[in-house]
Image (spheres, helix red, strand yellow):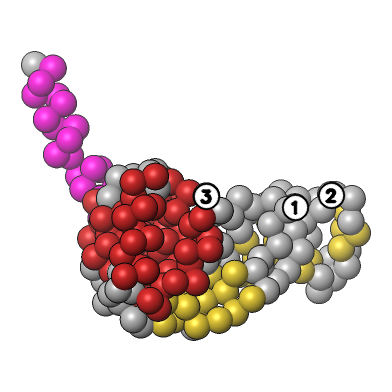
Amino acid sequence: MKRFILFLLLTSPINCLSKTSTDETLKARIEQIKKLDLFDSKIIFAIDSFDYNDLSFPYWNPDETYYQGDFARYKYILYEAKLDNKGVKPTDSEIYWIKSSGPHPSLYLRDSANIEDLRILLAHENSFIKLYAFGSLSYRNESGPYKFILNEIDNYRKILSAAGDEVSDTYIPELMIKFYYKKMSSAEIRNLTKLIKEKYHHLIPVLAIIKEN
């Protein structure tokens, strides 16, 4: 009887609706990422705090006075002050604050997307989606990123990426290595270093970073 009940729960419309909702959210975030014109390489590892300043607006501070029209960031979301206030959290009052934008669509991949979906996205034709999926797997300490770096090591395509205030054209495998190098084993680093020195010279600048590990 218990097994029958469990079967009904697993196959119930509620679970189907949940899966559908997840698929729709992922699809929506992917479409948003496609519209981005810049890859933010630090979004994946950002923990929203007073110390994270990669976004272009200030984090909400309970000791600051905000005047009508001021902007503040709170938990990945940008809010605009509707009225002058101090010490009022943006999430606590719709009278004083209104959501302006956010969160960054890639954060859904990092924090909520299924591992299986992220692995599928590694083969996506859009470079931003591929990289955010790779970064999300690395962030979650999933297995496989090193093997995927080797699969992409001969990719000579560059994308416009940002790291803090610096914006530059960067090779896709270079970004992957920067995401994952701290988690590589000594053997993986030796092998990757050898490959880059012998054949993939376009990635030589990243060796300086690997050596610091």
The amino acid marked with disc number 2 is Pro
Magenta stretch, overall SS: helix
Q: Is residue 109 magenta?
A: no
Q: Is residue 7 above or below residue 68?
A: above
Residue nearer the viewer, 28 or 119: 119
Please, what is the three-letter code of the amino acid marked with disc 1?
A: Phe
Q: In 3D space, how far apart are the residues under numbered discs 1 and 2 (Cα atoms)?
A: 11 Å
| Residue that carries the numbered disc 1 in the rendered image | 50
Task: Give the quadrant of residue 24.
Answer: bottom left
Residue corresponding to mark 2: 62
Position in image of residue 142 (x %, y %): 34, 45
Q: Which mark is residue 28?
A: none
Q: Which residue extends farthest top? A: 1
- Give the residue at x 13% y 32%: 8
Residue 80 place in picture, x, y as percent: 74, 68
Q: Is residue 75 above or below residue 155?
A: above
> Which quadrant: the N terminus?
top left
**Could you tell me which secondary element the residue under label 3 belongs to?**
loop
Q: Can residue 47 be seen by looking at this rendering?
A: yes
Check the image and report above or below for 95 versus 171.
above
Mark 3 neighbour class, 10 Å CA radius: few under 14, some 14 to 19, many 20 or more: few
* Residue 132: quadrant of the picture: bottom left
Q: Secondary structure at mark 2?
A: loop
Q: Report crowding for label 2: few under 14, some 14 to 19, many 20 or more residues within 10 A (C-alpha).
A: few
Using the image, tell me which numbered label, if any, was put on residue 213. Answer: 3
Question: Residue 29, can we see it?
Answer: no
- Please provide the residue range marked out in magenta: 2-22
Residue at left offset 10%, top offset 21% = 3
